[in-house]
Image (tube, grey):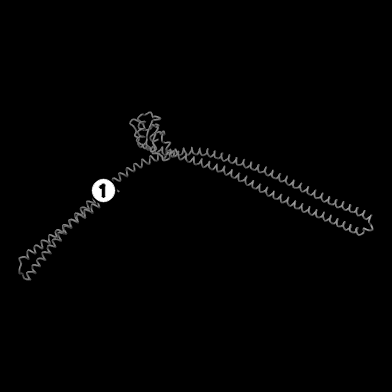
Amino acid sequence: MPSERGAQQQDLIATISTIVVHALVGIFLLLNLSLSNTSHQESVEAEAIPAEVVDEVAIREELEQLAEQERQRQRAEAERQAQLAQAAREVEERRQAEIRRQREEEAKRQAEQARHEAEERRQAEAEKRKAAEEAQRRAEEERRQAEERRTVEEQRRAEERRKVAEEARREAEEQRKIAERRKIAEETKRRAEEARKAEEIQKVDERRKVAAVEAKRQAAEEAKRQAETEAKRQAAAEDAKRQAETKRKAAVEEAKRKAEAEAATEAKRQAETEAKRKAEAQAAAAAETKRKAAEAAKRKAEADAEAKRKAEAEAKRKAEEARKLAVELAAREAREQFIKEAVLRHAAMIKQRVERNWSLPMGSSADQSCTLRISMTPSGVVTDVQIVQSSGDTAFDNSAIAAVQKASPLPAPSDAEVLAKFRTFNFRFKPGG
C-alpha cells in the first residue's frame, strides 16, 4: 500500500509538470507569433507611407520579396518551434527518466523494507508458533488429565443415573403390582355382589312360583267345595221337590255346568296370568341382570382404564422426572466442563502474557518458580499482586510481580462464572513450565 500511494503521487506530479511545461511552451509560441505579426505590419506600413507612385512591376517584386521574407520567417519560426519542441521533449524525457529512477529506488527501498518486515514477521511467527506449540502441548496434557477425570466422573454419574432409573423402575413395578392386587380384589368383590344379587332374584322367583301354585290349589279346592255344596243342596231340593222341580233341576244342572265352566275358565285365566307374570318377572330379572352385568362391565372397564391411565401417568411422570434429571445432570456436567476448559484456557493466556513481559534478573535462574495471588477487575486490570509461596530468590519474586503488573490488563473471560474464578486467584509462575 505505501508503494502504490508513492507511485500515484509521483504520477500526479509528473502529469502536473507536463501540463505546466506544455502551457509555458504554448504561451511562449503565442507571444512570438504576436510579436512577429506586429513587427511585420509596422514594417509594411513604414514602407508604404513614403511611396506615392509605383508601377505594377515594382509592386509585384515588392510582394514577392515580402512573400519570400514571410516564407523565410515561417521556416525560421518552424525551426525554432521544432527546437523548442525538441527541448521540451528532452526535458520531458529527462523528467520521466528521473521519475523512473525514483520509482526504481522507491521499489528497491520498499522491497528491502518488505523483506526486512517479512523476516521480522517470520521470526515472530516462529516464536509465536513455538509458544503456541508449547501451550498446545501443555493444554493437551491438561486436556488429557481433564478427560481422564471427566471419564471417571461420567462413569460415577452414569452409575448414579442407572441406580436412579433402577429405583424408578422398581417403584413403577411395585405400583403396578399394587394396582393389579387392588383390581383383583375389586373384581372379586364385584363378582360376589353379583352372585348375591342373582341368588336373591332366584329366591324371589321361587317364592313367586310357590305362591302361584298355592293360589291355584286353593282356587281348585274352592271350586270343588262350592260344587259339593251345590250338589248337596240340589240333592235335598230334589228329594223334596222331585216331581215339581224337574225343570228346575235342569236349570240347576245348567247352572252347575256353567259354574264349573266358569271355575275352569277362572283357573285357566289365573294360570295364564301367573305364567305371563312369571315370564315378565323372568324377563325383567334377565334384563336387570343384563343391565347390571353391563354396568359392572362398564365399571370394570372404567376402573381398568382409570388404573391404566394412572399407571401410565405415574410411569410417564417418573420417566419425565428421570429425563429431566438426566438433562439437568448433562447440562450441569457440560457447564462444569466448559468452566474447567475456560479456566485452563484463560490461565494459559495469562501465563503467556506474563511471560512475554518478564525479564530474567541478573544472577537468577529461570528454573525457579513462585506462587502469586493476583486480584484484578472484570476488565482485567491488576489491582493487587502478593507472594503466596516464594521461590527463595527475592529478585526472581520481584521480577514475577513486575511482569504481572506490566502485563496488566490481563485477558479477562466474558463468562461471569469463569470471571469470578479470576477476580482473586493463585498463579504459579514458572517460566517455560
In the rendered view, would you say 337 is above or below 79? Answer: above
Return the residue nearer the eye: 141 or 309.
Answer: 309
Q: How many marks?
A: 1
Please provide percent x and percent y for residue 135.
40, 39
Residue sticking out furthest to the bottom: 56
Mark 1 is on which residue type?
A: Glu
Q: Position of residue 302 (x, y in %)?
A: 64, 47
The quarter holding residue 376 reads: top left
Q: Residue at x 82, y 54 (%)?
A: 266
Say above or below: 78 vs 404: below
On the picture, is 172 further left or further right than 233? left
389 versus 104 height, above or below = above
Q: Position of residue 79 (x, y in %)?
A: 15, 60
Residue picked out by circle 1: 106
Mark 1 neighbour density, 10 Å: few (under 14) some (14–19) many (20 or more): some
Image quadrant for the C terminus? top left
Query: Which of the 4 image quarters holds residue 251?
Result: bottom right
Q: Position of residue 337 (x, y in %)?
A: 47, 40
Q: Nearer the viewer, residue 281 or 176?
A: 281
> Quarter-wise, where is residue 412 in the image?
top left
Regarding mark 1 in the picture, which secondary structure is present there?
A: helix
Q: Nearer the viewer, residue 29 or 237?
A: 237
Q: Is residue 114 left or right of residue 190?
A: left
